[in-house]
Image (tube, rainbow, N blue to C red):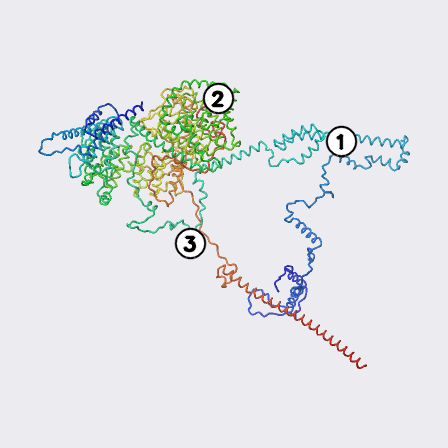
Amino acid sequence: MAKVKNKRNSGLADKVHMKKKSEANKKKLNPFEVHINREKLKVLGKKSKHDRGLPGVSRAKAVQKRKETLGVEMKVMNKTNAFIDRRIGEKNNQLSAEDRMIARFAAERAKQHSKKSIYNLADDEILTHRGQTLEQIEKFDDPRSDEEDDDGGKKFGGLDDDFVAEGHFGGGILSKTDAQDGAKSHKDLIEQLIAESKKRKAEKQKEKEQTLDLTEKLDSEWKDLQPVVFKKARVEEESLIDKLLSKAEKGQDYDKMMRELRFEKRGTPSDGLKSAEKQEAEERKKLEELEKLRQQRMLSEEEATAPKSTQATAKHRSADDLDDNFDLEDEQEFMLAYDKEGKPLVPEHVLKDFSVPNAKPKFNDGISDTSSEDEGNGEDEESEQEDDSSKEEKSNEEGREKESSGEEEGEEDDDDNSENESKDEDKSETEQILPKANGNVTENIDDSKETKDTLDDESGSEEEEEEDDDNEPAVKDDNVDDLNDLKGSEAESDEEIEEENEEKIGSFFDLKSEEGVKLKELLDGKSPTQQSAVLQKLIKSYDPSLSENNKELLSRLYAHMLQYVNDLFSNLRDDGEAMKSFLVFDKLVPHFYDLAHTNKVSSKKFMCDLLKEKHDKFKKNPRKVPDLDTLIFFKLVSCLYPTSDFRHPVTTPSLLFMSEILTHSRFKDAYSVSRGLFITALILEYTVLSKRFVPAAINFLRGILYLCANTSILNPIQVVPPFRLHRDVKILNLEHDCSNMAVQHKMAVKDLVDKDITDSFKVSCLLNCVLMLKEYFNNCNDMEAQEAIFEAHIKLLGRVDLDLYPNKVKSMVTEVLQHMKESLEVKTYTPLAREKVRPKALRLYEPDIQEVFTGSKSSKLSREKAEKARLESKYKKEMKGALREIRRDKAYIASVKIRQKIQSDNIRKEKVKQIYKDASIQQGELNKLKRMK
Amino acid sequence: MAAEQQNLTKMISAQLRNKANEFLNSRKHANNLADILQMFDAETDNYTPLLLTIEVIFSELLKRGDLVQEIIPLKPIDHSPEAEYTRWLNECYEAALVRCLECIWRGRTNSRLQALVTACKLMQIEGQNPLETTNGYYFPSVRLKNIFTVLLDSEITMSAPIARFQEFTEYKDVQQYGLKVLSTIGYKKSPSSIYMQNYLELLDKLLANEIPTEVKNKIKERDEDKEEKVLCAAEGKPQFKYHAAVCRRHANRCWGFACQWALCEQPRAHRRALLLLVERLMPLLARPHLATDMLCDSLDAGGPISMLALQGVLELVRRHNIDYPDMYDRLYAMFEPEMFATRYKRRLVHLADIFLSSTHLPEGLVAAFAKRLSRLALVASPEDAISLLQLVSNLLLRHPALKRMICYEDTPAIMCADPYVMEETSAAGSRALGSSLWEVSALRRHAAPAVGAAAAAVLAAVQPRPRAQPLQLAPPDVAMFDAEMKKRFKTIEMNFMRPQGMALPSNERLVQYWELMA
């Protein structure tokens, strides 16, 4: 059978075949037509298809098939026109008439959804309702008008059925007269009718007016409601105007309103009003998410990545790999070679591995320097410090210059925020604004003085202090006033001041060099709440959304505020002043938070620079605890940045700084001890979430307990430096009986300022120390090393003479001690063990399953080859078949052609014969005529 | 005030310069010299300009050869004005030198240092242009002796000038002659503590340049010809011959004197002596085992002194086959919280690393060390904790048996107490092997990220891969604070709860303990 070339003829053969098959099945086999094929080799269980055949039948079938396909094709060959019936399902007699209709309708619908019309939704399709199109129905006419049509529902103009039955067509007259004596005349009847209908009309009119009124009322209410529904300020204004207009022209308001309603933007469903609960829930969800992120950051890198690392990258493994993780070191192999002098050329890391620890390292810990630390020779210490400081000063100055320039460049790379700070500007500014720890702001910001200032800072600090001493009395007076101010007149606010403020705020950033001064002017002499309000106003008026460079201005403000806080807490003389500073700071913190959030990068930079500077200052004299003007920034850091992160650009250094202070400083007076406790509380705050372990703080508490306790030389309990056994004076040891003293639970501001150690100071030190110790202790609850860490504390607490302390303190301390002892008693120790690794199963290979085992050659081949062989043989077979078919096609075509030829020859012969016949007849007739003549 | 003084000194130095120039230009102004010398009598604390002037004058004179007296034997002293003048100049020179040396212990530090430098410079120039004609190499030992005498015999510590003197001991000849001179003048029966201090420091400085021992001698011989620095080298004269053996002999002699003193009574001198011994002298000593007694006594002294002695003992044990009883127990006892206060803590950690690197140590002992070190790391500052943890991880890597302290192979039995006994003085008896390094797992939660990482590294030491790394002791001035500051961060996390005041919305602790606003 020839391959079908024409598209329109595709599938023709199959159809024909199917049709005929059904007919053929009905025929009975003629036994004379059956030919039985001889079987050469009998295979058991093999179904043989070709054991018998019907040669005549199948030949006829094939011929018939060809006739219907090839024959037809031949017939239409070289003919251009053809009739094709394209009605869907027309020729298919298996389809019912209804199916045919459905199929046609579906095809029609599908045609509509062509590409062209995809956007014209419902354009061509006109929906109808009760035969009317929606457009026809939806005539936005006055609803009043169609009410009149309504009474069409009642027949006969609204007359009662009874009346109609009686009155119409005269039918009623007779019966009526018969039935009733006092019969009304026809005229009466008509009159009654008229009156009744009039009455009805009047009633209807009244009703209609009432509904109209109601509608109008509703409309006006809707107008009021409108701004609420479409919440938009502009609309509100417009609707107000509308109202005015509507007052002026009352007649038109309805149409107007209607049009408005039609074209008004409908409220989008998404921003429907959220209920308070929903908002709350959302907020909570957000916070939870942030909290989750925070928890994640708390983990170290290894912990965080631990689960991921188990999925090792797939490596090549040999089939007989035993999974014993025996790693071949072929990557690190190297060729041993020798250089010219005969030394082996070995890579660095290999050499390092084999090296013996260097026997003689260079220590620079005391050869050149003759002075000692441990002796405690006052003279020596001083001279050393002098030397050190003079050296460090120089190096620090150089270092600082370098850092400031170097850092800027580094930081810029870090900025992933899309900030449009121009680089140059930034550089010059930060240098100017950087708050200086020692100097006054007024000088620092000034550009010209900048460089000189940094040099003078250290040398000038002492002088400045002296100056401050001179100013002291004046300051004190101010303080008293301020305090009065604080307590009494927070509420009152002078309008004058406010006006002045506004002026200042307006011109705040006019002059770069005076910003710091202005801030100080703005805030000085005000109560904390007033300060807060002023700052609020200042920040609001420079909101980043208002102008482009406001962000930058605010970051500058942040730096100035840092400087302000620094100044606020430096040189505090008495507790009133300190308290005031804390109150102000309390109010400033939220603003710091806001500013830091508006510009994260620069605020972080300012904070880091500040910490660095403070740290440098501390390093110059590490024995002295830094004053509040440093410590307060640790608190600020904890307010602004998450302290629980495993690593954080700001909190980690500041925590390290604090622990450094506690390790290196000497605690031998009220000043240092109180500040130490301040820092310890802060460290507790830093670590309360992450439960990190800070030895410095715990050691400090140990030292404080040591200072409180009675220890004898004979029975010492070890302390950790900076506290020294037998050398530190027991400054906190209570000597008098204070059991009747009033207890003050918290440490007070006074303790930070006072110079001498009173009994109450000693008591509150011990109390707070013990309370904090308990928290630190609980933080370490899940560590096995807890006992090793806190053993000494418990021992020291046992040595404290609690009888001297107030009863309440005594009970609290014993309670804590009891708690610690008990929890240590029940502590269990599980030896450290590696995480149990699940034994690895031996690798299993997929079994090689052969679906049918033939034992033939092909089964031994690989899959691809077998497939190829299969395809090749199939191709060969098909080719053979196709060739045979073609041959038969050819034969058929030849037979058809020869038949045609024979036919045409026969016709020609016939015609020739006819012609001969005619001619002979003619000749005969002619001859006859001739003979006749 | 200060400015005025500065002006004054400037004026004076200008005047002095003028005078000196005049003097050097013509003999007419000879009296200028006398004037200048007289100015030393003036009460001031800054002799620097004077000293500089003297240096200029006499170095010029020495170079010119004006001071050379020609003494011809068997001839009466020449009384010609020329000779008289030379004689007078010589006298002046001597006087100036005496004045100069006086200045070493007078006045301000700067001035004192200048005096020393002037004396040494003059000595150098005199060496190059000797007063008496010599053929060979000449070194003015007398001058050096004078200088040393001044440096040693003083009421005050001379650490600053002696430290300055180090720049001269780099010269080989100064080293050799210095040792020789010191060995001649050093002996004293019962010296004061300051004398001892000065002596030891001076000896230390003289030995700052390593004296090659015999083994190295031959290898290095060739190289040293080029590098050798000689102070008093004059052109056209025979080269100075450096004898390492002579130096060693003199150094031994010097140390011999020191050994006879009661060094061990003052801790300062004791420490200085020990430092000198272990850092400089050990390889030079002819019979180092003689120092054993001193080292052992020092080892028992406790504190920083024993730490220093430990190094000496280590040297003896390693190189001189000395057996020392209870070596490891002593080392064990040194690991106390007090060690963090001493400046020798890094040295101690390093030495412990070497001591414990032997693979033949009993496991229990090493385990005790590991346990103790990690206990100490619990209270140490972050920097110290890291170095201690490194040491512990080295122990774990070198002694595979300690693995059970971090990964217990048997079914973990829950204990009710730590079997380790911290108070036990003998390391072997502390039952540490039954314990686990819980301290290290506690340190994983250290606030400083670097310490946490180091602790994690210790716990990861179970894996057989890494070898023991040599301890990397961070230089003491690299603080963790700065390291953290330099860290780069991709994002800057902020708190997400806006504080209403100083107190945090949750987990506030400062305000809980401090009443700051009432």
Above or below residue B487? Residue B155 is above
Q: Amino acid at mark 3?
A: Asp
Marks 3/2: CA–CA distance: 82 Å
Residue that mark 2 sits on:
A527
Asked if residue B186 shows in the view, the reply is no
Q: Position of residue A207 (x, y in %)?
A: 76, 30
Residue at figure coordinates x 67%, y 34% from the top left: A260
C-alpha span from label 1 to label 3: 99 Å
Disc 2 crowd rating (10 Å Cα; few below 14, some 14-19, many 20+) is: many
User: Which element type, helix, strand or loop, lies under badge 1?
Assistant: helix
Q: Which residue is mark 3?
A: A320
Mark 1 or mark 3: whose residue is earlier in sequence: 1
The picture places residue A1, in percent across and down from the top left corner, at 62, 65
In this figure, which residue is indicated by the disc labeled 1? A208
Circle 2 marks a residue in which chain? A
Position of the N terminus of chain B, as image quadrant, is top left
Q: Are marks 1 and 3 on the same chain?
A: yes
